[in-house]
Amino acid sequence: MPFLPITYASTSTKILSSWRTSKPVIDYTKCTRCAICWKFCPDVAIDLVVDSRLKSPNEKFSSLEAPSIDYDHCKGCGICETECPFGAIEMVREEE
Amino acid sequence: MTGNEAVAAGVKLSNVKVIAAYPITPQTTIVEKLAEMVANGELNSKFIEVESEHSAMSAVTASEMTGVRSFTASSSHGLLYMHEALHWAAGMRLPLVMTVVNRAIGPPWSIWGEHTDSFNQKDTGWLQMYCETNQEAMDSILLGYKIAENNKLLLPVMNMLDAFTLSHTSEPVEVRSHSTAADYLGELELESKMDFNNPAGYGSIVPPDGPFMEMKKDMRDSMYNATNAIKKEITTFNDLFNAELPGLTENFMMEDADYALITLGAISSTAKYTIRKLRERGQKVGLIRLYFYRPFPGEEIVKAVKGLKGLGVVERNLSFGQRGPTFEDVATALYGRVDVPMRNYVVGLGGRDVRVKDYELMFENLVEGNNEIEWVNVEAR
Amino acid sequence: MPLTIPREEYMEQGHTACAGCGAALSMRYMLKAAGPKTALAIPACCWSVVPGEFPATNLKVPLLYTPFAAAGAAISGLREGLDAQGKEDYNVFAFAGDGGTADIGLQGLSAAMERGHNVIYIMYDNEAYMNTGIQRSGSTPYGAWTTTTPVGMKRDFKKQNKKFVADLMIAQNVPYVATATIGYPEDLERKISIAKSIKGPKFIQILSPCPPGWYHNSADTVKISRLAVESKVFPLYEFRNGKFSLFKPGKTARLTDYLSLQGRFAHLKDDEIKVIEESVNERWSYLLKKEQS
Ligand SMILES: Cc1ncc(C[n+]2csc(CCOP(=O)(O)OP(=O)(O)O)c2C)c(N)n1
Ligand code: SF4
Ligand code: SF4
Ligand SMILES: [Mg+2]
């Protein structure tokens, strides 16, 4: 077969954390699990996970899916911080 | 059957599934004929009436990518307008076939024959074949798909016929058997076609340390090394259809020739007539007609010209600021292998007749073989 | 919480769009509604680089790269090629920038729509040629700085109004035409789904803010998208079977709220902002009238 310019490999193994100058940190005590951050992430870097160990505003929320930042793929754009209606995400400067 | 009708018949025989084309004289009657065949249900094909040649080539590139045999045709300015998309089709290794009815490039406007349009495309990664007869025009479509779809090659094929002398002139043509043609070509099975179960990027960017050069080398090697496979395919074709396609080249009265010309396409017929006439007068002259131009039949030429006292390369196209491209390619093939005095003749631009007396003049002039370029049948200003 | 847009992702992580890229969100949303039975054509634009270098791709649908002017023709060919194999149930999408749509590809787009192929053409509109480094396009709005409309002593920002390609598609009577933007993902998903349900040509223009090209904070991409709608700079509308409907945002914003977040408008003086304001209002009343007629 000829050598074709056809690409099958996934990009998801690429680590892009070096792109960031600051990183989003979720304060789970404020997070209502609304998934708005998940919805607006251009890098698909927020997973939704069920993790009962995560804090929550009250018990009602602890069994719900919570956002979890995938720091290998987050570019630190800050959209999630801007869009979170509950002020539960804060951008924190990356250490040099 | 006219050349353009023969092409349409060849497309029908090839069971083409998608056609996209834009009209331009003298290709138009191919498009019209195909549209009519589709309208009559004679040909079960999708017909995309595109708004430009760039779109024609881009549309058939995309349809071929889905895995169906596709076709287009153009001429002259239309072919130039496709240039970018021609690279795209070849670079994606798609076995398209396209017919080019060779016509001059303006300005000044001219709708008549010459080969500059397709010569301008010789470096796009397409195989190029120049037909001498309408029978060849039909056969070259079938043969073209067969060669292009060869898994080792997977490069598109451009089939040329001269404006009006072939495209609009009737000649006897034997339409090949439909069932034999269907068996011969079979259905297109393109391994690299768009696959929904295993989604890929088709034509993704490649950085300098990626395999860009390797891919281009693979294209070049695939074409350059295809000559044996093509020759074999021609033999099979001739046996199967009782056809008379030449090899990569046709040697005409070359066995004992002292002087010979190299030509492409329909003007070769007058050259042959002239040679017969000169032979009657005892002159040892012959002709090498290049049926394939890409891959360039260098080995064939080397073999054919051994022992010649003079070789004239007849050019129905033009490159400014250098000798003609055919001359350059022949000289490159012969370099360091055969030492034959050569001359370059520019003929037949803008549909200018290439007459018997013009060929006679070329053979006379050839004796001087001094690497110069000569214009034939041109008024002095 | 129930999710308001489909969960499935057909755009993977690891792509090379800038941080906060609106066009990346456009693709993400488009594919969620499009689903896996989708063939995509992308001409030269940011998105011809974003999916990744050889041998990678970040899309879970097949993607054909095409020459810059060829998106319209490529989707025509994909459609007819698939139909010739009885694959009528596969979607065919173009995903092209504003340059590839409003400028070099306009002829091919117009013709593809006119021929009536069953395709969806998505124009992601970041209002300039971003891939080549922020040059003006026909879709760049009045007042914007770009590298080919630089603001020097002679104040040579873009002096011409934006060409709204969606309006042109309505003039051509394309069966479904819509505008959308990434600040309204549910609306965008809905419009793609409607487009999928209609047989024939469809056109959707998605305003996609671009942090480096618009000189805005990457965190404000979604906010600016919403402000574009709330300030009426980028009205959302739908045109279906000859019926035009205009979205009237519940919350309105001032034009300056929209402009002031973007460095590309930073040079504008009050009278120049006034010019923008007038043309925004004029267009809004034109669209209102269109809805009533
Ligand atoms: C025929 C041709 N001319 C010019 C270019 C260079 N070029 C590549 S992308 C681009 C601009 C793309 O702008 P747009 O369509 O708005 O997409 P964006 O990059 O903004 O996403 C240009 C000018 C090209 N690839 N092909
Ligand atoms: S900072 Fe940007 S990239 Fe990172 S998780 Fe938030 S939205 Fe996604
Ligand atoms: S230049 Fe703009 S559109 Fe292009 S990848 Fe960056 S943010 Fe996205
Ligand atoms: Mg753009």
Image: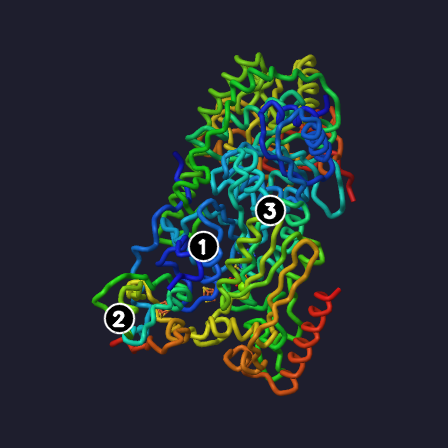
Residue C44 vs residue C121, the one in the foreground: C121
Which quadrant of the rendered structure holds the N terminus of chain C? bottom left
The three-letter code of the residue at mark 2 reads Glu
Q: Which residue is mark 3?
A: C73
State the residue lying farthest toward the bottom: C270
- Mark 2: which secondary structure? helix
In terms of depth relative to the viewer, which is nearer, B43 or A66? A66
Give amino acid for label 3. Ala
Res C188 visible: yes
Discs 2 and 1 carry the same chain letter:
no
In the rendered image, the vertical position of residue C97 relative to residue B45, given as above or below: below
Q: Position of residue A18 (x, y in %)?
A: 30, 67
Residue B178, image quadrant: top right
Give the spatial CA distance, label 3 vs label 2.
56 Å
Mark 2 chain: A
Foreground: disc 3 or disc 2 = 2
The residue to which callout 2 is attached is A59
Q: Which element is circle 3 on?
A: helix
Q: Residue at x 49, y 51 (%)?
A: C34
Q: Chain of mark 1?
A: C
- Residue C32 numbered tag: 1
